[in-house]
Image (cartoon, rainbow, N blue to C red):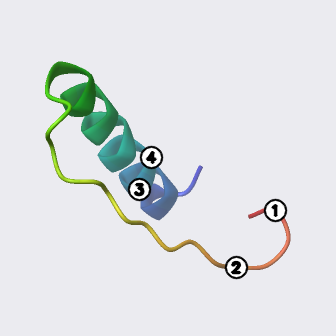
Amino acid sequence: MSEEQQHVFYRVREWCTKRLRNPAIEPIRVFITGGAGT
């Protein structure tokens, strides 16, 4: 993974772990676009 992809991955993972502990947490919205492989 590129550094930018890692940043997005870990940000989403962090949100998921917070959501497990607190279901009232705000939803995360991520827009991903790109060429082949996305």
Helix or strand or loop: what does disc 3 sit on? helix
Do callouts 2 and 1 mark residues in contact (Cβ within 8 Å)?
yes
Q: Earlier in the sequence, mark 3 or mark 1?
A: 3
Image quarter of residue 30: bottom left
Does residue 1 appear left or right of residue 7 in this picture?
Answer: right
Name the residue beneath numbered marker 2.
Answer: 34
Helix or strand or loop: what does disc 4 sit on? helix
CA gap between label 4 and label 3 equals 4 Å
CA gap between label 2 and label 1 equals 8 Å
Name the residue beneath numbered marker 4.
Answer: 9
Does residue 16 appear left or right of residue 31 in this picture?
Answer: left
CA gap between label 2 and label 3 equals 14 Å
Q: Residue at x 57, y 72 (%)?
A: 32
Q: Position of residue 38 (x, y in %)?
A: 74, 64
Do callouts 4 and 3 mark residues in contact (Cβ within 8 Å)?
yes
CA gap between label 4 and label 1 equals 15 Å
**Type of the residue with mark 4:** Phe
Q: Residue at x 37, y 36 (%)?
A: 13
Q: Residue at x 27, y 41 (%)?
A: 15
Camera-side residue: 35 or 16?
Answer: 16
Q: Is residue 15 above or below residue 33?
A: above
Image quarter of residue 14: top left
**Type of the residue with mark 2:** Gly
Which disc is residue 8 wearing?
Answer: 3
Q: Earlier in the sequence, mark 4 or mark 1?
A: 4
Does residue 35 appear left or right of residue 13 in this picture?
Answer: right
- Crowding at mark 4 (Cα within 10 Å: few <14, some 14-19, many 20+): few
Which residue reaches farthest front? 24
- Crowding at mark 2 (Cα within 10 Å: few <14, some 14-19, many 20+): few
